[in-house]
Amino acid sequence: MQFDDLLATITPQIYQRLVTAVELGKWPDGVALSAEQKANSIQLVMAYQAKYCPSEEAFRVGADGQLVTRSKAEMKASLTPPEAATIATFSLTNSES
């Protein structure tokens, strides 16, 4: 079985169980993951996320398996829309004199 074939057989429920197992370090029945199981599970989770869970996060694995990064300027621009850059403006002169 090829890796892509294995990835295609993973359902969203299996994916979620793998994520939980990697996060907790144990299977749902309480049995701890071996080092090999943890490494394989992490690899499957990352591959599944790259192929089926597209994301706009700054650091992620792309569909081609390569690390996708964004520059600091790109991240800042995505967090601060241009119209929200100025909150308020005030006149420095006293007009009530």
Image: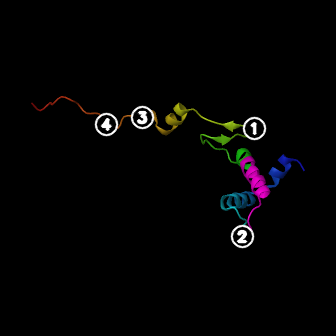
The type of residue carrying mark 2 is Gly
Residue 14 lies in what quarter of the image?
Answer: bottom right
Q: Where is residue 82 in the image (x, y as percent from the top left)?
A: 44, 33
Which mark, residue 30? 2
Dots 3, 1 in contact, CB < 8 A: no
**Which amino acid lies under the numbered mark 3 shown in the image of this protein?**
Glu
Residue at position x 72%, y 37% from top? 66
> Distance of mark 3 from mark 2, alpha carbons?
51 Å
**Image: magenta residue range:** 30-47
| Whether label 2 touches label 1, CB < 8 Å | no
At label 4, the amino acid type is: Ala
- Residue at figure coordinates x 80%, y 50% from the top left: 7
Which residue is the extreme one toward the right?
1
Please indicate whether residue 75 sits to the left or right of residue 41 in the image: left
Please give the name of the residue rendered at 75% of the width and 49% of the height, measured from the top-left corner: 43
Q: In the displayed structure, would residue 5 be above or below residue 22?
A: above
Residue occupied by mark 4: 88
